[in-house]
Image (cartoon, grey):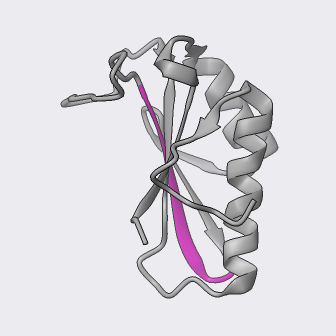
Amino acid sequence: MYDYISIHSIDYATSVKTEVLERFVVQTLGFEQTGPLQFSKALYGAHVGLKGIAANPDGSYAYYTLEGVEEVNLVEVILPTTKIDAPLERAITGLVMAIVDEFGWCIDEDHGLDT
């Protein structure tokens, strides 16, 4: 299992404004913002993180800071380091699918979820 799940626009071609992502993640999904485009949420006693990223058309990225990024086309849901049981997996899947539905993005095929 990977330590994160990537969600991105098809071919990384479209982006969403950072303030739109931030508002959705905080107000709708209930995350706390911990830094520029970085969020955290406790679920079933585990820590789940989320990060918005501006990726290149091939999906690669390199950054030193997310400060000043105005649009993103990739979100990484950082999975807990603890064992993921069925209720936690369902909750994480719900978060991922909410992002997919909200922005019309897709889950990177390298990261399988039971959806």
Q: Position of residue 75 (x, y in %)?
A: 51, 38
Which residue is at the front of the view, 28 or 91? Answer: 91
Q: Is residue 63 left or right of residue 6?
A: left
Q: Quarter holding the N terminus?
A: bottom left
Q: Is residue 111 placed above or below 62 in the rendered structure?
A: below
x then y, percent, for residue 16: 60, 16
Which residue is pictured at 55% across the width and 14% down the height? 15
Residue 47 located within the stretch drawn in magenta:
yes
Q: Is residue 72 above or below residue 96?
A: above
Q: Is residue 3 left or right of residue 83?
A: left
Q: Residue at x 39, y 65 (%)?
A: 3
When asked about the image quadrant of residue 85, the answer is: bottom right
Does 49 lie within the magenta span?
A: yes
User: Which residues are drawn in magenta?
Assistant: 44-53
Magenta stretch: helix, strand or loop mostly: strand
Q: Quadrant of the C terminus?
A: bottom right
Name the residue at 78% across, 44% down: 98
